[in-house]
Image (spheres, helix red, strand yellow):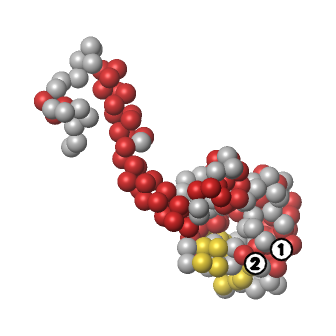
């Protein structure tokens, strides 16, 4: 353990010092433990960009430049055109159901689905041909997951994703309704957690 104050390991938290203890603990948990990482990022960032180039921008404007505009809707036709398939083809019935379902979604739900599969709610700058993953340029991939025979509808798994690789692992659902229900549950309840800009 690291003492919050000199000799802190010898001090007891009491009613008279508990506010100070909480204040120092919050500072440690929210700021100090990240200082070295933030400092290294800042140093590297400023090695690449001269500080005078970024000084005119607010934090919001810098985020917009780095991550894109979250209010720009996802272009469905561009997304489809730059999708690759593993175990499926463009003509697979589940793929047709999937894209029909995505087309029926509103902009917010599309963003949630895209976030679920890629970790980002923003379209890539320059379109889906520029989608990036952990290792650089990485197209969106729809991966077929075979279903074992004899599963009840309740036991059929939800889609899963490998966000670092822009992969949506879509089980080979036997009906359009099941695909829509399972994908909707995933986008609604599975689109939070690890995220990237």
Left or right: residue 94 versus residue 9 is right
x, y (%) of residue 106?
84, 54
Q: Is residue 20 above or below residue 60?
A: above
Q: Which residue appears at 75% of the width and 64% of the height?
A: 123
Q: Are marks 2 and 1 in contact (CB under 8 Å)?
A: yes
Horizontal and vertical percent position of residue 32: 37, 43
Q: Which mark is residue 55?
A: none
The reply, left or right, for residue 2 in relation to residue 40 is left
Res 160 → quadrant? bottom right
- Give the labeled residue for mark 2: 129
Relative to the observer, which residue lies in front, 61 or 43?
A: 43
CA separation, marks 2 and 1? 8 Å
- Residue projecting furthest to the front: 52
In the figure, 193 relative to 48: above or below? above
Figure quadrant of the N terminus: top left
Which residue is nearer to you in this view: 156 or 110? 110
| SS at circle 2 | helix
Residue 140: x %, y % from top left: 69, 75
Q: Quadrant of residue 185?
A: bottom right
For the view shown, which residue lies furthest in the left direction? 10
Read off the residue under disc 1: 78
Q: Which quadrant of the figure contains the C terminus? A: bottom right
* Tag in front: 2 or 1: 2
- Residue at 72% x, 82% y: name it: 84
Residue 59 in view: yes
Badge 2 crowding class, 10 Å Cα cut-off, few under 14, some 14 to 19, many 20 or more, is some
**Which image quadrant for residue 124?**
bottom right
Q: How many marks?
A: 2
Residue occupying the point 18% across, 24% down: 12
Q: Judge whether residue 185 can be spotted in this image.
A: no
């Amino acid at each position: 353990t690291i003492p919050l104050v000199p000799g802190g390991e010898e001090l007891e938290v009491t009613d008279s010092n508990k506010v100070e203890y909480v204040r120092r603990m919050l500072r440690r948990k929210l700021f100090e433990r990240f200082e070295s990482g933030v400092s290294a990022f800042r140093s590297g960032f400023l090695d690449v960009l001269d500080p005078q180039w970024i000084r005119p921008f607010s934090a919001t404007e810098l985020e917009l430049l780095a991550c894109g505009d979250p209010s720009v809707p996802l272009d469905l036709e561009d997304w489809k055109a730059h999708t690759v398939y593993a175990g499926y083809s463009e003509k697979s019935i589940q793929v047709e159901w999937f894209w029909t379902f995505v087309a029926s979604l509103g902009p917010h739900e599309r963003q949630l689905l895209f976030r679920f599969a890629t970790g980002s709610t923003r379209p890539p700058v320059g379109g889906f041909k520029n989608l990036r993953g952990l290792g650089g340029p990485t197209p969106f991939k729809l991966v077929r997951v075979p279903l074992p025979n004899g599963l009840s509808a309740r036991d059929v798994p939800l889609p899963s994703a490998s966000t670092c690789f822009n992969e949506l692992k879509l089980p080979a659902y036997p009906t359009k309704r099941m695909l829509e229900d399972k994908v909707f549950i995933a986008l609604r309840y599975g689109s939070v957690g690890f995220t990237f800009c």
